[in-house]
């Protein structure tokens, strides 16, 4: 929807959320910003926190667009209700046992970087279950080390049940207990630990980011992407653009290049050196202006001005609002990143049904003598996945756009 007028309103809720994210994750910032290099293979391993990400793709999208010039592949091995022993990955075929199944999946994914998110399920066992959890997590980290993969550990997220009879306080106390254990193990083994418990807890007080008080919704994953980026030492806010018009001349910040300044300073044409695509906004929910490009244009004559990008109308605002700065929330870059996100979701869907076929017992298990011929079809899905990954790399590169600001007549 094209906005004809823009009003800037101070929103204390958004400021509160932004400060909460920044302060909560500051302790996790490393000396050097996190980097993904060419041919890295990133694996998301854990429970429903990662499996539900199949629906939204925000985490993978944020990391993909950050380094658009690098060939990085992603595999999501999240499994709802799973624990460090892989017990939710049960199969009618035995062997392999659920734990052997987990180990095989990890090995086959050939990870170089692994985000590990466990503890939410195990925390239901309380303090009594802590020794077994530590043992399982230790073995998982040993496995990653043997594969030469870098492990990044995440805390569980809090629960926020609306049911008054649910013992939310005790549940969260147990989750914090397990989060502390994860943090200590990470410290002892020289691994990076990211606390997502506190940021999600604070944000959930002001924004609807949880479903059923347990699982993140689309807005929740949008915020989680921000939390992870900041915790990894990555800035989520693009460098703002400032253009000042005066005496038939225009000066711009390094990110912008002036192409043309019209007569009487009424029209302006420029390009931006954009390093990566913006993160698409959720369909619903108040998300603030993280990840959005802000453009400030001072010196315009009084009136309203429309910004177009590659001839597509994007936003209209008064000269005063342009001088204060306007956030760009739509346009060709958002169209491009929406297509990129759709490719990521399709690729992940192909992978999901490849490594978790519904009739696994009949195709790969002890009854494969009945439908084992379909195993070839599962292998052939790798060709589709590989093609989609190639398309993802091609479409993640930002394009140089022509911006034009013109007065509304």
Image (tube, rainbow, N blue to C red):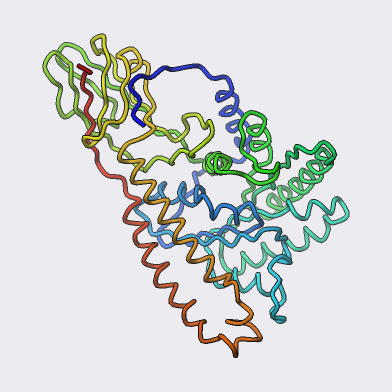
In front here: 225 or 370? 370
Give how far across and how far down residue 81 sits, in percent: 71, 58
* Residue projecting furthest to the left: 263
Residue 1 vertical placement versus 140 (above, below): above
Pick the residue in front: 352 or 70: 352
Q: Hey, which quadrant is residue 136 in on the image?
A: bottom right
In the image, 342: left or right of 201? Answer: left
Reply above or below: 108 against 345: below
Q: Residue at x 69, y 47 (%)?
A: 156
Q: In this view, does 247 lie above or below 115?
A: above
Quadrant where the C terminus lies? top left
- Judged left or right of residue 299, residue 184 is right
Residue shown at the point (33%, 41%) measured from the top left: 333
Considering every residue shown, the one lying at the far bottom of the view is 369
**Which residue does the image show at 59% across and 23% down from the upper left?**
13
Q: At x 37% / y 20%, what residue is drawn?
A: 325
Counting every numbered tag in the picture gives: 0
Residue at the extreme right of the image, as rendered: 128
**Image location (x, y in percent) of residue 275:** 34, 41
Name above or below for residue 90 compared with residue 265.
below
- Asked where in the image residue 98 lies, by quadrant, the reply is bottom right
The N terminus: image quadrant: top left
**Camera-nearest residue between 237 and 37:** 237
Quadrant of res 232: top right
Residue most extreme to the top: 302
The image position of residue 148, as x and y in percent, is 56, 66
Q: Residue 328: horizontal and vertical position, in percent? A: 36, 30
Q: Is residue 385 left or right of residue 182?
A: left
């Amino acid at each position: 929807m094209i906005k004809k007028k823009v009003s800037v309103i101070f929103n204390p809720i958004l400021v509160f959320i932004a400060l909460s994210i920044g302060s909560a994750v500051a302790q996790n910032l490393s000396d050097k910003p996190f980097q993904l290099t060419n041919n890295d293979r990133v694996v998301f391993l854990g429970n429903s926190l990662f499996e539900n990400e199949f629906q939204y793709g925000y985490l993978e999208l944020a990391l993909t667009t950050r380094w658009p010039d690098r060939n990085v592949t992603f595999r999501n091995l999240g499994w709802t209700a799973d624990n460090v022993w892989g017990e939710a990955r049960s199969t009618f075929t035995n062997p392999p046992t659920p734990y052997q199944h987990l180990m095989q999946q990890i090995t086959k994914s050939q990870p170089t970087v692994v985000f590990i998110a466990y503890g939410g399920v195990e925390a239901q066992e309380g303090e009594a279950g802590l020794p077994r959890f530590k043992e399982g997590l230790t073995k998982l980290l040993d496995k990653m080390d043997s594969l030469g993969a870098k492990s990044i550990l995440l805390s569980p997220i809090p629960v926020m049940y609306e049911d008054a009879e649910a013992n939310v306080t005790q549940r969260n106390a147990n989750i914090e207990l397990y989060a502390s254990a994860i943090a200590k193990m990470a410290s002892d083994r020289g691994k990076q630990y990211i606390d997502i418990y506190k940021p999600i807890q604070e944000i959930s007080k002001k924004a609807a980011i949880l479903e059923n008080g347990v699982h993140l919704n689309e807005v929740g994953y949008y915020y989680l992407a921000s939390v992870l980026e900041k915790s990894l030492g990555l800035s989520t806010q693009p460098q703002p653009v400032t253009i000042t018009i005066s005496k038939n001349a225009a000066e711009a910040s390094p990110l912008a290049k002036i192409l043309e300044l019209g007569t009487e300073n009424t029209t302006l044409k420029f390009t931006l050196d954009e390093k990566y695509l913006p993160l698409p906004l959720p369909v619903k929910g108040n998300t603030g202006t993280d990840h959005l490009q802000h453009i400030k244009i001072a010196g315009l004559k009084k009136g309203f001005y429309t910004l177009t990008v590659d001839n597509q109308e994007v936003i209209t605002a008064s000269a005063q609002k342009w001088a204060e700065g306007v956030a760009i929330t739509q346009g060709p870059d958002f169209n491009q990143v929406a297509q990129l996100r759709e490719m990521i979701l399709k690729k992940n869907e192909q992978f999901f049904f490849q490594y978790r076929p519904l009739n696994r017992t009949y195709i790969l298990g002890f009854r494969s003598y009945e439908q084992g011929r379909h195993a070839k079809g599962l292998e052939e899905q790798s060709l589709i996945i590989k093609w989609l990954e190639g398309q993802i790399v091609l479409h993640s590169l930002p394009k140089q756009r022509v911006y034009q600001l013109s007065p509304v007549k």
